[in-house]
């Protein structure tokens, strides 16, 4: 926990310094890798990235108030700094990212609050934001006016990799100073290579873990879907999580249900809990109690009351089970008492409702009752470019899901478009390549082709190299006139302005889905639609 003496930071990061006496009296109150976020007393971590080299900003950071800077052993620029500044450079044994992660591990060991690890192939960021909001609410007492708020720290945006996890653990809010210590850290964890999850778990030591979905992802580094699933599941089966939240709507996770224990929590729809396989497993697990005494398992069931195009009403029922409720879990606390509640999820698609139920179950494990959850949910702000619905002039609706795309998330977005409330709208799809699928890219884009071939009367514009194959296949099937009002392909870097002006904006009432991997930059299509001004 911050603050820490600069000498402690040097030791924890495994770094060296020119003169240890230069660190005497220096205190560090947080860390940043962004030179634009320098505040007095911080640690500046110089990281070499694709576009910028943080070492170019070391002198600036130290002059603007950073107590010390962490630099690579290979950086020759340290010798060019004035002595007063170079003496405050902590030189990593190798690279700064590794040293920074060592520092993060040391800080994590001091946390008096639980860390929640959120993994999965898609939906992580939205679920993380849902959970952070739900945990931030406190029930208003009679003496209070308005909602009370608890401090929850979380991963910023989608910074969930080797550097991002360290940034999340070392943020200045993890401090012994100030009035409001965090009640939890909601840590998003992403992987793109074999072994990455194990390293993240070893670093962050999450107390509570959950997986949103286990679809194909990052296959360029992970190889196959099964390998990706195994690597994601290391969040559950490595380290020492105290509570695992099982999403029983995911088939790949259900396949591993035999590894669940009575300390785990299970989340599913009411109907899913009744399926023979799941019902039988849970029943047998509850009978395997100590000395033959039955043990009720912790579970959260949900039922969709109404699935609207832009929001879903969800009834949830939380039952902590007599194992969880018997005594507090070290580092986590006591779960909330049983409750029933109805919530409105203001995002399209059943996948978002399922992830919301997963977040509710996690918050309930950490003691949040129905009243506190209701207060916290009012604070939820959907993350940008994810299931974002924007009403445009002339009864046009933009469905901006342009941040990323995987086979599973693409299916979820296309499912959401089928809502009957949108049946009167002309549909247009702007889709970009699903990147980072490695040798299986063609396989998964072919599956997408088969699904798109079933559409009728839509306007379809495809961006990118992989989508050219989709376009060609649809043209070969002679579907350009029969199935699609418009079928067009554009290179990845094409200006969407003409397409927006000539095709999308004349449609009304309309619904336009924009979705593609982040590297495709399809947010420019959404921006073009939002900024479009029709001629007078």
Image: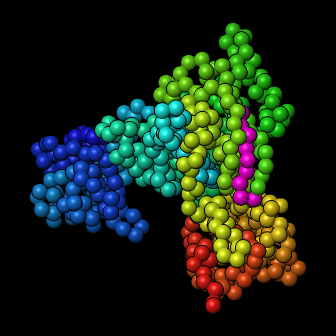
Query: Where is residue 164 drawn, in percent x and y?
Result: 44, 52
- The spot of residue 59 in percent (x, y) is 21, 63
Residue lying furthest top = 291
Instruction: Write down the quadrant of residue 78 in the picture.
Output: bottom left
Residue 143 relative to residue 321: left or right = left
Kindly tell me whether residue 321 is visible in this rendering.
yes
Q: Residue at x 69, y 70 (%)?
A: 397
Residue 66 is drawn in which quadrant?
bottom left
* Front-most of residues 519 and 139: 139
Magenta segment includes 208: no
Above/below status of 112 relative to 324: below
* Nearer the observer, 413 or 86: 413
Is residue 84 placed above or below 20 in the rendered structure?
below
- Residue 508 in percent (x, y) is at 75, 77
Q: Residue at the location (58% across, 71% down)? A: 523
Residue drawn at the location 40% of the way across and 34% of the way down: 111
Q: Residue at x 51, y 42 (%)?
A: 146
Q: In the visual, does 531 lie left or right of 507?
A: left
Of residues 262 and 306, which is closer to you in this image?
A: 306
* Quadrant of the rendering where the N terminus is positioned: top left
Residue 424 as seen in the image, left or right of residue 336: right
The C terminus - image quarter: bottom right
* Range of magenta residues: 309-317
Q: Main secondary structure of the magenta part?
A: strand
In this view, 81 is above or below 101: below
Left or right side of 439 for 192: left
Magenta segment includes 313: yes
- Asked where in the image residue 402 lies, by quadrant, the reply is bottom right
Residue 238 seen anywhere in this rendered image of the structure: no
Where 487 sits versus 261, above or below? below
């Amino acid at each position: 926990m911050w603050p820490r003496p600069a000498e402690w930071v040097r030791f924890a990061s495994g770094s060296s310094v020119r003169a240890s006496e230069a660190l005497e009296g220096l205190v560090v109150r947080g860390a940043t890798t962004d030179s634009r976020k320098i505040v007095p007393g911080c640690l500046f971590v110089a990281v070499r990235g694709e576009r910028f080299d943080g070492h170019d900003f070391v002198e600036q950071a130290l002059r603007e108030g950073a107590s010390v800077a962490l630099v690579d052993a290979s950086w020759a620029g340290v010798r060019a700094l004035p002595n007063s500044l170079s003496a405050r450079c902590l030189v990593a044994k190798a690279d700064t990212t590794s040293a920074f992660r060592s520092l993060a591990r040391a800080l994590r060991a001091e946390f008096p609050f639980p860390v929640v690890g959120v993994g999965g192939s898609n939906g992580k960021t939205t679920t993380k934001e849902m959970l952070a909001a739900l945990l931030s609410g406190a029930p208003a007492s009679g003496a209070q006016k308005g909602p009370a708020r608890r401090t929850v720290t979380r991963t910023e945006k989608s910074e969930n990799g080797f550097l991002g996890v360290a940034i999340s653990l070392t943020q200045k809010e993890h401090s012994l100073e100030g009035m409001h210590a965090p009640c939890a850290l909601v840590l998003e964890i992403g992987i793109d290579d074999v072994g990455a999850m194990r390293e993240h778990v070893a670093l962050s030591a999450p107390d509570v873990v959950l997986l949103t979905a286990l679809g194909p992802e990052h296959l360029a580094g992970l190889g196959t879907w099964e390998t990706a699933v195994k690597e994601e599941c290391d969040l559950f089966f490595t380290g020492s999580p105290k509570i695992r939240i099982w999403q029983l709507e995911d088939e790949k996770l259900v396949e591993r249900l035999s590894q669940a224990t009575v300390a785990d929590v299970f989340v599913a729809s009411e109907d899913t809990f009744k399926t023979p396989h799941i019902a039988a497993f849970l029943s047998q697990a509850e009978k395997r109690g100590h000395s033959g005494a039955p043990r009720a398992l912790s579970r959260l069931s949900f039922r969709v009351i109404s699935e609207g195009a832009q929001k879903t009403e969800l009834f949830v029922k939380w039952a902590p089970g007599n194992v969880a409720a018997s005594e507090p879990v070290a580092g986590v606390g006591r779960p909330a008492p049983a409750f029933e509640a109805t919530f409105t999820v203001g995002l399209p698609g059943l996948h978002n409702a399922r992830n919301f139920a997963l977040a509710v179950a996690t918050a309930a494990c950490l003691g949040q009752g129905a009243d506190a959850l209701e207060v916290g949910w009012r604070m939820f702000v959907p993350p940008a470019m994810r299931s974002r619905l924007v009403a445009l002039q002339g009864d046009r609706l933009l469905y901006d899901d342009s941040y990323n795309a995987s086979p599973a998330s693409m299916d979820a977005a296309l499912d959401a478009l089928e809502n009957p409330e949108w049946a009167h709208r002309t549909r247009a799809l702007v889709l970009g390549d699903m990147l980072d699928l490695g040798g299986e890219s063609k396989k998964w884009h072919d599956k997408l082709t088969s699904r798109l071939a079933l559409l009728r009367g839509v306007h379809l514009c495809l961006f990118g190299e992989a989508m050219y194959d989709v376009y060609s296949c649809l043209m070969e099937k002679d579907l350009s006139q029969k199935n699609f009002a418009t079928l067009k392909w554009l290179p990845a870097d094409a200006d969407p302005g003409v397409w927006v002006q000539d095709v999308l904006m004349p449609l009304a009432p309309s619904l336009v889905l924009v979705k593609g991997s982040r590297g495709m930059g399809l947010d420019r299509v959404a921006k073009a639609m939002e900024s479009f001004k029709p001629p007078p």
